[in-house]
Amino acid sequence: MARYCPVCGNVIDDNMQVCAYCGTSDINDQQAAGQYYTGDPYQGMVMEGDPYQNQGYLGDPYSPSGFSGYGAVRQGIPAPGFSDRVEHPEIVAAIKKNGRAARIFGLILVPIPIIGFLIYSLVSDKMEVGSGLLYGGIVSGVFLIFAIFSFTRNRAANTYDADVIDKRTRQIYRNRNSDDPGSVTEYTTIVKTLAGKKKKIVEREGSRIWAYSYLNIGDRFRYHPQFSFPYELYDKSHADGIYCVSCQRKNPVTSDRCSGCNLPLLK
C-alpha cells in the first residue's frame, strides 16, 4: 500500500521518517494513529507541467495547489465538495472592491433626478423651479431608498446549503385588461435547505436566469450572497462550467482561474 504524507499528501517511501516535500516528521507515529492518507483517488493527481507541483500543502489555504475541497489537488476536475477558496485573499479583495464600486455608483445616481428636473425647470416655461426641485427630490428619494434597501438586504442574506427538488415555469401577463397584455416567462427553482426549509428562487425573463439554468433537480449547492454569481455546486464534475464569483464569466470546469479577471475559481 502506498504511503502518503499526512500534511502535503505526496507519496513517500516506506522507510522515510521525514517527508522530503514538506518536512513533516514523526511520520510513523502519525501512521500508527491513522493520520495519513491511503487510497484517496484524488491524491497525487497533478497535471504534467504543473508549475506548482510539490510546492503546496493540502493544509495551507493560500498555496496554489493547497486550495481544494476535501483534500483533492486543484488540477483538472475537482472532487465533490464545497470549495475552501471562499476566503481566498484575491477573492475577498475583489468582492470588497466590487461592493465599494456599487455603493459609489448608487450614490452618484441619487442626485441626478434633482439636477435633471432643476435644469429642465430653468430652460423651460412648462415647469417652475420649485416644482422641479420637488419632483426631482421625490425621484431622488426613491433612488436613495432603493439603494439602501438593496445594500441592507444583501448584508442580511445568509449562506445556506440546499438541494434542488423541483423547477417550474409559467407565463406572467403584464396587463390582462389591455388589448395587448404581453407576457414574460417566470422561472422558479424550488430548493430544500439542509435544515428542512423550502425556498423558491424566482427569476423572470429579461433578467439574469442563473439558478434555473445552472442548477438541476437533485443538485446540492451552496448559496453565497456576497458573490456576484452566488451558486456553487457540491459536485462540479458533471457541470458544464464554473462561473467566476466576481465577473460572472463561465469557465471550463477544468480551469483553475477565471479567463476574464484571473481570479481563482471555486474549486
Image (spheres, rainbow, N blue to C red):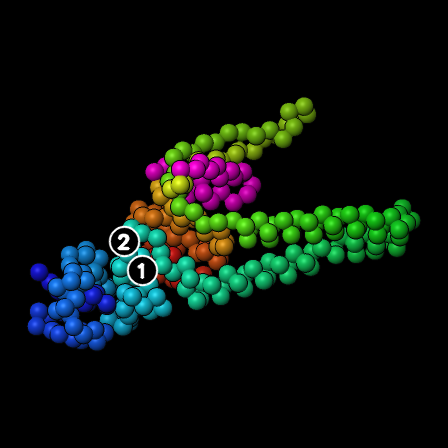
Q: Which residues are magenta?
A: 196-218
Name the amino acid type tagged 2.
Answer: Ala
Mark 1 crowd level (few <14, some 14–19, many ≥20, 10 Å Cα)? many
Apparent side of residue 214 relative to residue 146 in the rendered image (left or right): left
Q: Which residue is mark 2?
A: 79
Q: Position of residue 3 (x, y in %)?
A: 13, 64
Q: Position of residue 160 (x, y in %)?
A: 43, 47
Secondary structure at numbered mark 1: loop
The quadrant in which the N terminus is found is bottom left
Q: Which residue is mark 1?
A: 68
* Residue at (40, 62) in percent of width and height: 264
Name the amino acid type tagged 1.
Answer: Ser
Q: Earlier in the sequence, mark 2 or mark 1?
A: 1
Secondary structure at numbered mark 2: loop
Apparent side of residue 60 relative to residue 210 in the rendered image (left or right): left
Q: Is residue 235 above or below residue 183?
A: below
Q: Is residue 244 above or below residue 161?
A: below
* Residue at (79, 51) in percent of width and height: 137
Apparent side of residue 106 relative to residue 96 in the rendered image (left or right): right
